[in-house]
Amino acid sequence: MGRRKDKRKFHKKEQEQSKDGQGWKNDIRGAGYLATPKENQIFEKYYKEQGIIPEEEWDQFIDTLRRPLPSSFRITGFKSQAKAVLAIIKSEFFSELMNRKPDADEESLPKPTCISWYPDELAWQLNINRTIIRKSVPLQKLHHFLITETESGNISRQETVSMIPPLLMDVKPHHSVLDMCAAPGSKTAQLIEMLHTGDTTNPEGFVIANDSDNKRCYLLVHQTKRLESPCFMITNQDASHMPNLLVTKPDGQKTNLLYDRILCDVPCSGDGTLRKNVDMWRKWVPQNSNNLHGLQLRILRRGLELLEEGGRLVYSTCSMNPVENEAVIASMLNNCEGSVELVDISQQLPALKRQPGLTSWKVMSKAQVWYSSMDEVPELFHTQIRGSIFPPANVQQLHLENCLRILPHHQDTGGFFVAVLQKNSRLPWMTAKPPKVSAPVEEDGSNAGEGDGEKKIETRAYSPPKKKFRYEGYKEDPYIFLDPDDPILPPIKEFYGLGDTFPVKCLMTRCLEGQKRHLYLSSPAVKDIIVHNEQKIKIINTGVKILARSNKKGVDCDFRLCQEGSRSMLPYITTRVLEVAEQEDIVTLLTQENPFLYRMSPPLHEKLKNISTGSICFLFNRPASENASKFSIEIVGWRGKVSVRSFVPKDLRMHILRLCGVDVSTIDKAFQLKLEKIENKRKTDGKYQDDDEEGGVNEAGSPGDVESTDKDTVTDLEVDRQDDSTKILSGVIENADSEGKKSNDGETNAPMEENSTSSIGANGDGMHNGVKSSKTEASSETVIATAEEHS
Ligand SMILES: C[S@@+](CC[C@H](N)C(=O)[O-])C[C@H]1O[C@@H](n2cnc3c(N)ncnc32)[C@H](O)[C@@H]1O
């Protein structure tokens, strides 16, 4: 029990960190950023000598590096709602920024710019800082919108250049995809979205996201959970020793898994992120890159071994240094002896400004001595500097110009490097044995031929160098596939009307013994990998939670639906889906805590009367509008005796309400007050002065402000979070109170989603932010009687 508690605490901390990383904290820059010296003589000497930056652009290059990085974000693409979200951003938030004329004493507001090479206007860049946000109502609104939409997974904050590699991978829904160094996971999210292109709910393919750092794997969990995909898995392996995984071929035979697409976004010195990680100005030394070259090479090599013939591997770094980039690619191309080639991507993303890869570069030692070839390196340093770091003799034949380097000053971004590799034939060092005929695989994953002599597994992948498999970090609970004859299943199948197509065999639980609390759904392809390989790899997370135990008396099923699994479950449920025709019903469900059944529109009220109590899924098919094609909204809820409720996490509520055209700032009283305060100050003082400005941002950025600035930044965020947690509630309470109704229905009080907001601010004893809720005060009989009268 203690261990579980510890683990939860740890995960929570990781998630908090992840929120900060994924959130908007970095955009709120203060004196700390300004005060950090942005000078490094060796850095300048190094990059001038490498000739990467045209001489006439040098000043622009270095000036850009000294300026903060604009924020950028993507509207996540696999939900058909993305276009509707884009329409909302443009009409409600951007238009105000674009059109507002600043007062005489006011700074003009930053204008959002669309990232021109990103498809469908779904990525944007914005130059904001904390001082401006604090002063401006439109920016406060936008900032608030970005925070809540990021939490609900509809917006992903991501560095502009980091969006490039997945776009060059050409991922299709049937592809097997490996992201070798995936944490914190912004690119993984893009890959999963691509797998679900066209709103494919359950695609054939899958994404395996791997990272060697156990803690960072939990950042990945947070990042990917929002996408609610049953087609992905997080593993915790050293990518340079990524194990061969067994899968079943259509003919039932076992074979090593080779991937159609691999992303190799390797650990790097990261000097392309200088604008964000200002500490790097102080720490930058050439040996950082020299030291990483070997690991990068080993990870790339393993990636190519695991790549299917005809498959594509994208190698990327956020470093501008050729030692970590062209040198790694050139060395590997030579090792591959023609079996792998660089893809010409010059015609892809035509609006993206880029530099071609280099064909010559030099190496600088720790002592800042330049070398042009290994012959010049004294033997003493041969352990520090390897031959593969230099341009090979045949460098001109390798087409390194097909690589792509992004320079920060060209598009006001970070620096980045990408190479796209195609594997055309077997790698020369892979065993060229003719494939063996393998025996069919049994249901339990064992090989039918095992035990009678030779182990019959087709050898399509070279085994990585032996490395003892060791568990580090928390030992995760195993994923156990449910026995299709498990007695918990028939009531579930009957209650939800799950037909024969429902993939019972892909249901998992994580409880070894005792009652099963949650059921997860994986795709068949992911299941196949788990059953054959669980002993080989450390699986951190997989599957989407579809059902949670509720044990509600008087209900025919002990399991209720989970919001995060609703998209995956919807195609199979026949008895508990209620189509909602009136958008107003969705608004009622999301703004009132336990609305009485009669509060719903007559058609929905009728449907609700005809369905038994228990878990339900509301489905609203929103017709196409001028700005967005049609899309559906699923809301998981509970039909009580006299009322209904929804189980939707708070930020998702905000998102759906926005899609329904509700101005959520009117519901969120705390946020509205904040806006009014800013507006009043602006009007009365002429100049905005924050209450807690003392010790806060000093625009001149005096070093003495560093600590207090950081503290302020956190406080701002905390305020935002607190606002988030009370906003809907304040709406709900006011709504209920103002109508003089008691939101009382003991019957609807089903167990909540862990992060459900049906009880935002409510604690176990029925208190809402210190106010005793009507639920505990009124007798249920009275309310039922009242409700019945009304209905
Ligand atoms: C550049 S970051 C990856 C960023 C990530 N692709 C994204 O877009 O969010 C490099 C990652 O490699 C991981 N890493 C370092 N050494 C590794 C190894 N040997 N195998 C796998 N991952 C490794 C680090 O933990 C880090 O999370």
Image (cartoon, helix red, strand yellow):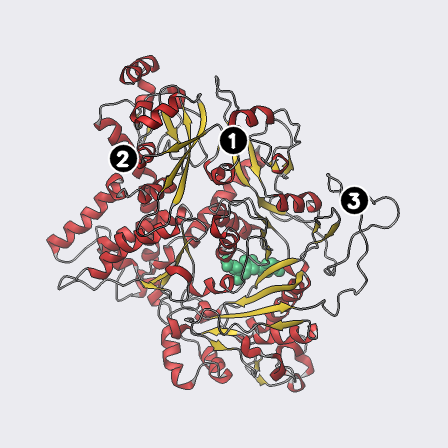
User: Does any atom of ligand 1 lie closer than 8 Å to the CB of label 2?
Assistant: no
Q: For the point 27% across and 51% down, which residue is it?
A: 141
* Residue under pointer 3: 447
Looking at marks 2 and 1 on the same chain, the residue that comes earlier in the sequence is marked by 1
Tell me whether the residue at label 2 lies in contact with that at label 1, contact meaning CB atoms closer than 8 angstroms.
no
Q: Compute the Cα span from label 2 to label 3.
A: 59 Å
Q: Which residue is mark 1?
A: 548
On the image, the x and y values in percent for residue 599 come to: 29, 26
**Image quarter hosting the N terminus:** top right
Instruction: Report the Cα–Cα distance between label 3 and label 1.
Output: 34 Å
Disc 2 to disc 3: CB gap under 8 Å:
no
Q: Is residue 556 above or below residue 61?
A: above
**Count of residue discs:** 3
523 versus 424 height, above or below: above
Amino acid type assigned to the residue bearing label 1 in the image: Ala
Residue 134, percent from left and from top: 25, 55
Amino acid type of disc 2? Gly
SS at badge 1: strand
Question: In the image, is residue 411 above or below residue 241?
Answer: below
Closer to the camera, 567 or 770?
A: 567
Residue drawn at the location 66% of the way across and 28% of the way down: 485
Tell whether circle 1 marks a residue whose Cβ is less than 8 angstroms from ligand 1. no
Query: Would you call the spot at circle 3 few (<14 residues within 10 Å), some (14-19), or many (20 or more)?
Result: many
Frontmost of labels 2 and 3 is 3
**Helix, strand or loop at disc 3?**
loop
